[in-house]
Each structure stands twice: as structure tokens, then as C-alpha cells.
Amino acid sequence: MTSRLFITSRIRDDLTMTVKHLSETLINQIAAGEVIERPASVVKELVENAIDAGASRVEVATAGGGKSLVRVTDDGCGMTPDDLGLAVQRHCTSKISEDLDSISTLGFRGEALPSIGSVAKLRILSRTGDADSGHEVRVAGGKTEAVRPAAANCGTVVEVRDIFYATPARLKFLKSDRAETGAITEVFKRIAIAFPQVRMALSGSDRTTIEYPATGSDRLARIAQVLGKEFSDNAIAIDAVREGVHLTGYACVPTYNRANSLQQYAFVNGRPVQDKLIFSALRGAYADTIPRGRYPVAVLSITIEPAFVDVNVHPAKADVRFRDPGLLRGLIVGSVREALTRDGDRASSVGARDMVSAFRPEFGPGTRRFGEGGSHRPHGAAGQANYDPASSAFRPHEQSSAPGFSEYGQGTFTAFSGPSARSDATQALNDNEAGADAGFPLGAARAQLHENYIVAQTDDGLVIVDQHAAHERLVYESLKQSLNSRTVASQVLLIPEVVDMPEGDCDRLMAHSEHLAQLGLVIERFGPGAIAVRETPAVLGEIDASGMIRQLADEVAEWDDADGLKAKIDYVAATMACHGSVRLGRRLNAEEMNSLLRQMESTPGSGQCNHGRPTYIELKLSDIERLFGRR
């Protein structure tokens, strides 16, 4: 009781204290808490300043994960002695005057350098192109020394040592040198992708040197430098304009995906951003084409009038707000889907690479080579267990019969039967003239292996198709087209279900009520803090309407979309397609196999099944020749 009275007394005493103006050093340290989160933040701010200065070359050197040293050198326009003195003071900048609606530079707030100087030891050395010598200024823990002459090349060198030495509590929150180095590298890569015309280098005692030569206007070449040649091999170009908003960049084929979102890059007017709207739209564009828990790979660049985007949302400038988010989302989803429809069904280069690697395993000490006695069948690479179809998570459904193509408007199947089935199949393929299907992307069927894998010959290689996965996708797309061509049928609830939830969630859900009604979910406002569910999608059967509404409310709050319901309906369609497609063990003749190949070529999304796995793998002739040592 005494302790509580003491605390209450202290609070009352604080409330009666005189209001004071904080010192400039303390103000800068408070600002540094938002602007300078870790050494990577320092690198970001300094490299952006260098690019704003017109640099064609930027070099970054670090030590101790950036905690001991960050040095950024550029060949930009440099600063005069007067500029140096002002640059380390708060809210002094050369990049804007009075108008926040026309920001065209990466930096503009005038907070970075004084914030850094308040928590670290800062030294800036600079020289303009028309000056005979350079000058330097030093700031340590918020204390600024006078500007003085110093030898310098044209451009600017900013050196930051002992970050957070003036605020030791912040220093304790930094991660290991390795983790901080990784964060710096990621920031460096994002800026490098945004500015291919700038030569960039990153070095330090704790890493090998990373250097990206300038590629001029060739953005894809710079992306390949940063993300590897595999990106360019699997990338699809995007170039679209809608109402003055220009979207360019590259989205990779769905079968080229990752376990996290680290290879999703977004830029707004050249500024690297981490924007929920953009990444949500990207997720929607790849819906039902990649496996759950996997992420697409893409680099998207948005050019928009500065007045239509607010970059002054947060001091770190990583978040932005768009005046018309619906326009931007529609542009991204529509453009990426159009690109995937146009060119997204080609096989990922990773599949061919993995296939070649599987043919050429690394032999270990316990691996028996061919011809070394015993069985002539080598073990899998790295002790990999043999495939067991009975326990595999990816085993096909074990149904001996399945509807033919005719049931879905896809042609007709005729099963092989009798003791001469294999010879009949062989004869049918032999009868198929060698050039009958030449020129088709997926080529001409030549064989069926293990009653599930179609081998087709193309002009420059061969294709192996998983017939079950491929037909599953064809049926799924047919069902989706049927669903999308009209409003989804709904079932009227005998007694409407009333779901109580916060008023804000109700407002957000009702904003999407027309879209939800097209999907068979009819909702109405039931007072200020409740939603009444009148109808639910018939295809979902008996569902927990309350749980679904709450889940949709959470989704809208986080992503500003209600695609969760559509995903549920698509899941039902995918399940129906899985059970309605041709099964493993179904023997096909040449005509049926070629029919399947032609339908795949004309069906969007046929490069992967409903679960996101590839439906076919392509081997180029060069890959095959490499296996036999011809290359």
C-alpha cells in the first residue's frame, strides 16, 4: 500500500513539473531511435544520400557487422564548407523547399546525419568539383566540431564508427556481427537493384567483396548480378500503364518460388519500400499457382506522380501510402496475371537443373558405383532414402478409374486392355510421324513411362509430363472458368447468423460486401457492432459462418482484401479437379497423350498443378549432351 502511494505521489509530482525544451542532443537521440534502428539503417541513409548527390560509383566498407565501422564513398557532386556545417544540423536539406507533394529524391527530411552523429562518431569529408581542396566535419555523441580543410577527392566520404556508443542501451539490442552483416547486405542489394546505372561495391573484414558493375538501362542484367542468373532464366517481363501509374519489372514463373519473401522487391519512384499493399497484390496475383507456404519471386517498380503517393509516413521512409490503393492493386494483380497467362507456363530452369543433378549424384564413401559388385543400382545422393509411393506425401490418389476428358470437354480416353496393350501402345507411337507435332512448345508424345509420365520430343530437347498433375490443372481451370462466368450459387440460411465484432471490422467488411455477394456470401449490417450473414456459398456446404466472417475481417484489416473466401471456393474446385482427373496407372495412346499436351499449351496456369508443383520438366538437348560428356 505504501509503495502504491509513493508511485502515485511521484506521478502527481511529475504532472506539476515545469515544461522544458529538450536539448538538441537529446532531440537527435530520440529521432535516431526511429531513423537509425541498426547499422543497416546507417548504410541505407548514406547510400541514398550518395545517389541523390548524382554519384556514378558508390563503395561501402564495414567492420564488425557495421557496429565498428561503416564507410560510404561516392563520386557525387560533393559539399561546400557551408553545406558541411548545415548537413549535420537537424532539418537542413538541399532536396526540398516548401512542397512535400513533389518529392523526387530518396532523402528529404534532413534527419539522418544529425541522428547518426548523436549516437555514433561521425566524420564527413567532401569536395566539390570546382574546389581546390576538400573540407571535413566531425560529430561525436551529438557534439559538433568546426569545419576544417582536409585533403579529399571529388565527392564525399562519410565514416561512422562505434554506433550507439553514446546510447549503450540501444547497443545491447543489436544482433550478432553475422546477422547485422546480413541485414546490411540485404539493404545494399535492394538499392543496387533500384539503380543499375550506378557501380556499387560492398566490402569489409567480415565478408567477401560484392561488386556490381553498372549496367546502364539494363535492369534485368543488374537483377541477375544481385539475384543470380536463375532469376533472369525464369523471369517474365511486365510493362503496364493504368491512369498514369506505370508498372514495370519482372515476375518469375510460379514453379520458381522460395520458402520466404526475401526475394520480393518493390520500388516506388526508385525508392525501395516494404509495402503491404504491393506484396498483398503480388500474393493475390499468384493465388492457386504456388504451394501453400511458398512465395513468388518478383521485382516490381512503380512510377507514379509524387503528389499521388505519400512517402512521409515514417522517418525510415520504407512505408508509403497511395491516394488510390485500389487502382494500384488492380494494376499489379491484372498485369502479373496477364504476364503469367502469356508466358508463365514454361518450365522452371530449376527443374531441369535438379533433374540433371539427380542423374549425376555425388558419390560418397558408402555409395556403391556401377559395376562394383552387388546390385548395379546406385544409392541416392547424400544418403537419400528410396522413394516409397505408399508413404510419400505427394503420392497420387489411388483410384483405378477416372472420368475421361469427355466429361470435362477435354476429348476422349480409351484405356488399353488385354495382353497386347503394351505392344499396341508402342505401335501407336511408332505410327505417329516424327514431325507430326514439330513446332509445338511441348512437342510430340513419344512414350508413356510407368503409366503416368509422358515423354515428348521438342525441337530442341524433351519434356516429361506428369499426366495426373497436368490433367488435374486442366479440369481445375475449367471448373474455375465455370464459377467465374456467373455469380457463385448461394444457400439461404433459415435463421440469419449474427456475428458480433468491433465496429471498425464491420465497416471494413461492408466495404467488400458486393464482392463477397458475387462469391455467394451475402451479409448485412446488424447494428453498429454486428454483421448478419444471410446466405453462404452453396459449394462450401455446411460451414462455420461466424468463424469465416471473423477470419475475413482479420484478412481485410491486414491486407485490405477479402480473397480468403475466393480461396476457399477455389480449394473446393481444386479438390473436385483432383478427384476428377486421370490417375496414375492409366495407359494412354498417342492421340490421347498429344491431346493432353495441346490442351496444356492453351490453358493458363498449366505449368503447375493445383498444389503448385510442376506438371512438366523440360530438358534441353544441351542438358542431355552434358550428361553424356558431349559438352
Image (cartoon, rainbow, N blue to C red):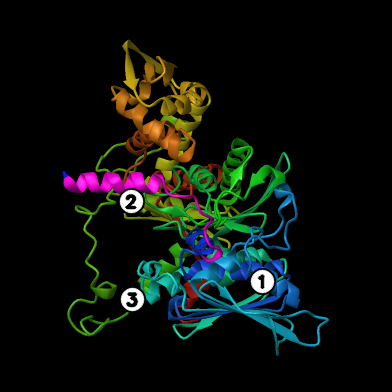
Q: Amino acid at mark 1?
A: Ala
- State the residue in front, 45 or 58: 45
Q: Which mark is residue 361?
A: 3
Please, what is the three-letter code of the amino acid marked with disc 2?
Glu
Q: From the top left corner, tell me how far across and down residue 377 is, in percent.
A: 24, 74
Left or right: where 373 falls relative to 65: left
Note whether residue 228 is visible.
no
Q: Tell me if mark 3 has few (under 14), some (14-19) or many (20+) residues whose alpha carbon lies within 10 angstroms of its own.
A: some
Magenta stretch, residue numbers:
2-25
Query: Compared to 484, does 340 lie above or below?
Result: below
Marks 1/3: CA–CA distance: 48 Å
Indicate left or right for 192 with 366 as reference. Answer: right
- Identify which residue, 151 or 220, lies in the foreground: 151
Name which residue type carries label 3. Pro
Could you tell which of marks 1 and 3 lies nearer the N-terminus?
A: 1
Q: Is 575 left or right of 112, judged from the image as shown?
A: left
Residue under the point 22% across and 67% down = 385
> As displayed, is residue 199 above or below residue 404?
below
The secondary structure type at the circle numbered 3 is loop
Q: Which residue is mark 1?
A: 50
- Image quadrant containing the N terminus: top left
Mark toward the start of the polypeptide (1 vs 2): 1
